[in-house]
Amino acid sequence: MKSGMRREDDFQERRKHIANLTDEELYARFWELTAQVVDPLLELGRKNTTPSVERAVLLRMGISSLDTQKIVEGCMDRGLMGHGTGHVVYKLSKEKGISIRETGAMLAKGECWDEAVALFK
């Protein structure tokens, strides 16, 4: 802003549409607006991932590079890419109570895929 210029204080005018809401209604409105912002971003992520992005995620989770390709292919074959391969591994590891590395190794060997798919039904 240039010196000497002041923005007109219009807070009272801008808040009229929410002025009479209760705290609970304001809370609900906040999350409704947040969803409107976040949902399209999540949709972009689901539709625009690539095998190389998914392999990179798995590598950063500590899964061996040899296993990442097999896990990505397994997710692609089963329609799980939209959930994210890291999410698939993470959710299955929590379900089984084992480490992410152990889960990745099992999936890379072709084990537990039915269980993984069932978690996303």
Image (cartoon, helix red, strand yellow):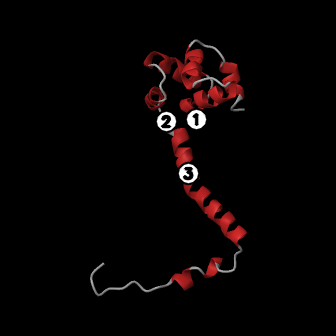
Mark 3 crowd level (few <14, some 14–19, many ≥20, 10 Å Cα): few
Q: Which amino acid does label 2 sit on?
A: Thr
Q: Position of residue 94 (x, y in %)?
A: 65, 29
Q: Which residue corresponds to the image point at 52% horizontal and 82% vertical from the top-left?
A: 11
- Residue bearing the label numbered 2: 49
Q: Position of residue 30 (x, y in %)?
A: 62, 64
Disc 3/disc 2 C-alpha distance (Å): 14 Å
The kind of secondary structure element at disc 2 is loop
Q: What residue type is labelled 1?
A: Gly
Mark 1 crowd level (few <14, some 14–19, many ≥20, 10 Å Cα): some
Against 114, residue 38 (above or below) is: below
- Residue bearing the label numbered 1: 82
- Quarter holding the N terminus is bottom left
The number of numbered discs placed on residues in the rendered structure image is 3
Disc 2/disc 1 C-alpha distance (Å): 8 Å
Q: Where is residue 43 in the image (x, y as percent from the top left)?
A: 56, 45
Do the residues bearing badges 2 and 1 touch, measured as CB atoms within 8 Å?
A: yes
Q: Which residue corresponds to the image point at 64% horizontal and 14% vertical from the top-left?
A: 111
The kind of secondary structure element at disc 3 is helix
- Residue bearing the label numbered 3: 40
Against 97, residue 15 (above or below) is: below
Of labels 3 and 1, earlier in sequence is 3
Q: Which residue corresponds to the image point at 57% horizontal and 12% vertical from the top-left?
A: 109
**What residue occupies the far left of the structure in this picture?**
3
The kind of secondary structure element at disc 1 is helix
In-front residue for pair 100/84: 100
